[in-house]
Image (tube, helix red, strand yellow):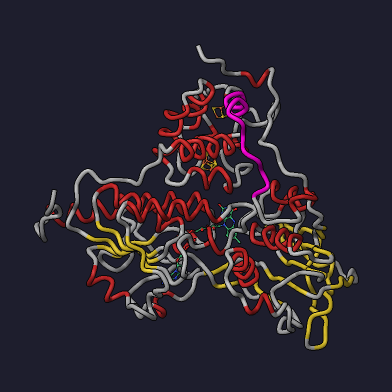
């Protein structure tokens, strides 16, 4: 019998975290690897719940108790196979899922004993599988004479592409960027997800026969209509990139920048690209007093990047309190350890400066009555204004979708009132026949794990659609074995 339920005698222990002083000096990931014995021991803390809330709250429905049991028994290859059966990129989710809000936050042990370190075990299994050479490019059992065009090489497009390729479809993925990964490459910083981890997946997908057309923007270099002619089905997985505007005097001052511009510059620099806006200093926090406005994951990434660039001071201004922020509490702890100061219950009233930003005038807030969504609304406290020094202000207030019907010159592509693409909840098809959509462009700004889930669901939906079309006699779906 495997030794499980060891939560009674064994404390939770995450993989070792590098000291904050060391982390501040580089952009490498902050956790060291789990040792095999530690991973097995930590997995053995699981109590093998009859109703595993960890699994219920994992967007992929990962079979967590079973792969923890196999890990505890040191049956690592089988544990990995199980983890990979429901997740295209377990090593990525293990690193960057906000586990404290998902699987681990719902582990029954969390309240009295601290959760099983599910994410760290998931990462350990996949890294072990890569090192042992168990992970091979997906090989379809048969080739289908049908091709799918995917717009967007982020996690939704990549997961869908892999699932469709496994079924035998020819898959072409188009992206306006010069690299594969979407926000995994250009949004999420290295200290959460090293870029080699994404490039390793790209290599596997290419070896599987997926063709990437990079630096190809649909709507500019190629039309959606052309894509529909080329392919039997099209998947739109373009993410959301329109930064939410901040309405505040002084917003047009120099050195007030949107979060993604700042993060893309830093990520490109880390990848060795020439980035004139960084080299000129406009997007470099070095030596500056930095104020980041916002309380989500993007704001956390900005403050922690600024620390690593050698900022003189880094403050995060958020209008709600710590308990009511959208970002992960774990990320806040990392940021605090690294020297970030959080100014809770405070919002900007004006950005100060003469041509170039020199400070932020903020005012204190209190949380008033809940709105229709149940969230308490922040209200300004009269006469509570105070000034913070700032040579660089980064706005991180979230993202909205771009106007895709206009960009794609496809007025018939219906959107919701939020601008996300409308899909039929059963067929996952948009208002255009044979055009599907997945990821943030449907859901609004969300998480990588949801993008993977949506990509997998879209792949199934596309397969069903093409099979039904074949049965209806349009053309045989399978031409070549
Ligand atoms: P994206 O990853 O945005 O990919 C869309 C792709 O489509 C891009 O490559 C883009 O270039 C391409 N594209 C867009 N328009 C076109 C066009 N017209 N033609 C061709 N290509 C096009 N989630 C987490 O789970 N954990 C985190 O820690 C986390 N941190 C984040 C940090 C930041 C700074 C940001 C911005 C987001 C973070 N997220 C995090 C959210 C997560 O990155 C997204 O939810 C996820 O990447 C969405 O996947 P997607 O495939 O739908 O879109
Ligand atoms: Fe947890 Fe994310 Fe892994 Fe699911 S995919 S088990 S939520 S870390
Ligand atoms: Fe194990 Fe926690 Fe999941 Fe229960 S909720 S099966 S203890 S990981």
Q: Position of residue 195 (x, y in %)?
A: 55, 56
Q: Which residues are magenta?
A: 29-42
Q: Is residue 373 above or below residue 126?
A: below
Furthest residue toward bottom: 355
Q: Is residue 175 above or below residue 108?
A: below
Q: Position of residue 59 (x, y in %)?
A: 48, 44
Q: Is residue 476 above or below residue 419?
A: above
Q: Position of residue 131 (x, y in %)?
A: 49, 38
Left or right relative to 228: residue 477: left
Residue 39 colored in magenta in the image = yes
Residue 170, by quadrant, is bottom left
In this rendered view, identify the residue nearer to me: 253 or 472: 253
Residue 414, by quadrant, is bottom left
Left or right relative to 426: residue 298: right
In the image, what residue occupies the spot 13% across and 48% down? 481
In the image, what residue occupies the spot 40% across and 37% down? 134
Q: Position of residue 451 (x, y in %)?
A: 46, 54
Residue 401 colored in magenta in the image = no
Total tally of numbered discs in the picture: 0
Residue 236, by quadrant, is bottom left
In this rendered view, identify the residue nearer to me: 377 or 32: 32
Q: Is residue 61 above or below residue 446?
A: above
In the image, what residue occupies the spot 84% across and 76% down? 359
């Amino acid at each position: 019998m495997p030794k499980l339920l060891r939560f009674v005698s064994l404390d939770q222990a995450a993989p070792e975290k590098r000291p904050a002083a060391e982390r501040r000096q580089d952009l490498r990931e902050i956790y060291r690897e789990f040792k095999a014995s530690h991973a097995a021991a930590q997995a053995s803390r699981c109590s093998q719940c009859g109703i595993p809330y960890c699994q219920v709250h994992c967007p992929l429905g990962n079979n967590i108790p079973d792969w923890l049991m196999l890990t505890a028994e040191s049956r690592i290859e089988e544990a990995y196979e199980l983890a990979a059966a429901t997740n295209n990129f377990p090593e990525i989710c293990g690193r960057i899922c906000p586990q404290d809000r998902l699987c681990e936050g719902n582990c029954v042990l969390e309240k009295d004993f601290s959760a099983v370190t599910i994410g760290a075990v998931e990462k350990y299994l996949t890294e072990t599988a890569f090192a042992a050479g168990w992970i091979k490019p997906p090989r379809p059992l048969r080739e289908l004479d049908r091709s799918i065009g995917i717009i967007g090489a982020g996690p939704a497009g990549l997961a869908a592409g892999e699932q469709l390729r496994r079924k035998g479809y020819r898959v072409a993925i188009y992206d306006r960027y010069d690299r594969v990964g979407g926000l995994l490459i250009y949004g999420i910083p290295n200290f959460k997800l090293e870029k080699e981890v994404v490039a390793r997946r790209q290599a596997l997908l290419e070896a599987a026969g997926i063709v990437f057309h990079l630096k190809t923007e649909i709507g500019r270099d190629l039309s959606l209509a052309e894509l529909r002619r080329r392919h039997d089905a099209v998947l739109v997985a373009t993410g959301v990139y329109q930064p939410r505007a901040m309405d505040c005097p002084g917003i047009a001052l120099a050195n007030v920048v949107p979060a993604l511009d700042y993060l893309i510059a830093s990520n490109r620099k880390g990848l060795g690209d020439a980035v004139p806006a960084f080299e000129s200093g406009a997007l470099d926090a070095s030596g500056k007093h930095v104020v980041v406005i916002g309380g989500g994951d993007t704001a956390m990434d900005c403050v922690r990047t600024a620390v690593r660039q050698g900022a003189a001071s880094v403050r995060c201004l958020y209008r709600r309190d710590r308990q009511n922020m959208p970002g992960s509490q774990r990320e806040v702890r990392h940021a605090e350890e690294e020297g970030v100061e959080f100014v809770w219950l405070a919002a900007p009233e004006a950005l100060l400066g003469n041509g170039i930003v020199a400070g932020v005038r903020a005012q204190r807030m209190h949380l008033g009555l809940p709105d229709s969504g149940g969230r308490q609304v922040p209200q300004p406290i009269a006469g509570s204004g105070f000034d913070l020094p700032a040579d660089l202000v980064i706005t991180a207030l979230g993202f909205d979708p771009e106007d895709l019907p206009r960009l794609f010159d496809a007025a018939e592509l219906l959107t919701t009132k939020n601008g996300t693409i409308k899909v039929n909840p059963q067929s996952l098809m948009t208002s255009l026949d044979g055009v599907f959509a997945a990821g943030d462009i449907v859901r609004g700004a969300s998480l990588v794990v949801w993008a993977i889930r949506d990509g997998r669901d879209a792949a199934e939906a596309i397969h069903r659609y093409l099979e039904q079309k074949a049965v209806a006699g349009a053309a045989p779906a399978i031409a070549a074995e």
